[in-house]
Amino acid sequence: MTTTATYTWPAVLAMVSAPTEEEAERYANEIPNAELMERGSQIRSEKILTDLVRFGGILGEFWPKATAAQKRHVLGFSEPLLKVFVHSGKKLADMVAQFDATEDDREVSRAAAHAVADRTYKEGMEDRERLVTALEGVAHLEPGLEERISKATGRVTDFTTLAQSLTALTKIAKDIRQNPLSKAARQLEDGGLDSAQILAFEDVAANVKSTGALASGARTKGKITQADLDLQDGICLALMERVMKIVNRAHERDPSIPKLTPITTRRMFPSRKRNVDAPAPEGSTGG
């Protein structure tokens, strides 16, 4: 009795890397969305994922070790197709997880993102005030410096403008320190605005920008709908059909090539009756 190996998404993704943008575009779906959604609506996403992750694991193990003779039989299959096949399935798995999440879960995630963003914004504003104060203290020592500081300080209204202001002010500090023997540079150094502190301000600016983006995403991110799932179901089924056709016909010619046998999606893929060519007439010598 043979046993079927059990594959998980982490294991499969460790074997099959994500497709590049060019590879994803090369194998992008060309079937009308309505047709894909209609097909996808006929079966639960979980059933598609059960077979798809298993196929991904089988092919992920087979393809890197395939011989030239085996690859000759699976003409039409490729590493980019394998990547798109597997990662389309992972996308479906992620969509299912998001679809199944309760509204309470989503609210908790949004609240957490907003709390982090609010704290980071408050800290960013405090650091900005410290930086402005230090720079204003040496503004009279270099021509045009006061105007530059005023312009960089500007008016902050959100995460984006705060990050921009911090970045601009930090650049002024770096510019001053380009001449380490100047009075302004030496006074900044004395006051604690050294290289390490400038790097810390740069990190603050980046942090403000990223947490603001996350909070905005948590606020505006739409829910996954059943229609979204049906479409991705249809895309995965189309890819499964294409891959199975190539690999299973190759298996008929060379049994060392693994066979992809659907279990949970069997009804979506009617079995193919094998065509047996009629033998050549006796005495035939061919063309």
Image: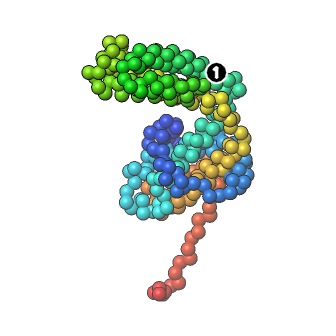
Instruction: Name the residue rendered at 53%, 18% in the picture.
Output: 125
Q: Position of residue 138 (x, y in %)?
A: 39, 17
User: Against 218, is 229 above or below?
Assistant: below
Amino acid residing under circle 1: Ala
- Relative to residue 20, is residue 196 drawn left or right? left
Q: Name the residue tied to disc 1.
A: 111
Apparent side of residue 175 relative to residue 233 in the rendered image (left or right): left
Residue 190 in the image, given as x and y percentages of width and height: 32, 12
Picture quadrant of residue 107? top right
In this rendering, the answer to whether 160 lies above or below 130 is below
Q: Can residue 69 be seen in this view?
A: yes
Q: Position of residue 196 (x, y in %)?
A: 35, 20
Name the residue located 72 percent from the left edge and 44 percent from the top edge: 227
| Residue placed most toward the observer, 96 or 169 | 169
Within 10 Å of disc 1 (Cα), the crowding (few <14, some 14-19, many 20+) is some
Is residue 24 found left or right of 34 in the rendered image?
A: left
Which picture quadrant has residue 31? bottom right
Residue 259 position, x and y percent, is 52, 53
Rendered residue at 41%/59% (across/down): 70
Can the viewer see residue 127 in this picture? Answer: no
Colouring scheme, one of rainbow, by chain, secondary structure, one colour: rainbow
> Circle 1 — which element?
helix
Depth check, front residue: 41 or 276: 41
Q: Which of 148 and 60 is in front in this view?
A: 148
Query: Total number of numbered labels?
Result: 1
Q: Residue furthest top?
A: 191
